[in-house]
Amino acid sequence: MRGVLAAVLIAALAGGCGGGDEDPPDRPPRESAAEAVVRGWAADLRRGDVDAATDRFAVPALVANAGPVERLETRVQVRSFNASLPCGGRVVSTRREGRFLVARFRLTRRPGADCGSGTGNTAVTAFDVRGGKIVRWIRVLDPPPKLPVV
């Protein structure tokens, strides 16, 4: 009986492997919940859907875009922040750094904004996602500085 059960289990697992539809480029297999939020947010902005991008943020949220950290305390402030971003972006890689998911984006044009010469460049942002919402959005240097070994 155990042999039959093992064969059924192996067949069921193998049936889900290989073949079938490929994942779209913005949705790699086995992504974390945080990655899904970040990729969804990026897709929202690329489409010019600032309201959908705003809905992916918690209130309050902390943001820093090449300046001091700002506390966004209302949905209107979060929407204004998202609308102020001049480019859309396609996630090209992610990595975990403690609480943060650090995402590298290839910048794109987006409806309703002017990305200008930024199109095609890369940008890196650290996201803290909790409960399916972005609670911290921090632009980081691209590439990160080399730290001295001490």
Image (cartoon, rainbow, N blue to C red):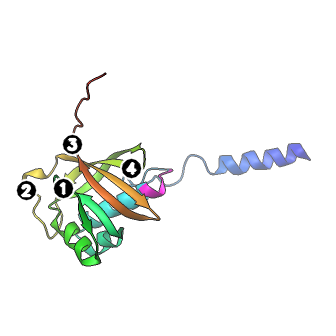
Q: CA distance from mark 4 to mark 1?
A: 18 Å
Q: CA distance from mark 1 to mark 3?
A: 14 Å
Q: Which residue is mark 4?
A: 100
Q: Residue at x 16, y 54 (%)?
A: 67
Quarter holding the C terminus is: top left
Magenta residue span: 30-34
Query: Between tags 4 and 1, which lies in front?
Result: 1
Query: Between tags 2 and 1, which lies in front?
Result: 1
Q: Residues within 10 Å of mark 3 (few under 14, many from 20)?
A: few
Q: Position of residue 123 (x, y in %)?
A: 22, 48
Asked if residue 68 lies in the magenta stretch, the reply is no
Q: Position of residue 107 (x, y in %)?
A: 20, 52
- Give the quarter of the image for residue 24: bottom left
Of the numbered discs 1 and 3, the one sitting upstream in the chain is 1
Q: Answer above or below: position of 59 versus 142.
A: below
Q: Position of residue 78 (x, y in %)?
A: 26, 71
Asked if residue 32 lies in the magenta stretch, the reply is yes
Indicate the amino acid at tag 3: Leu
Q: Residue at x 36, y 58 (%)?
A: 38
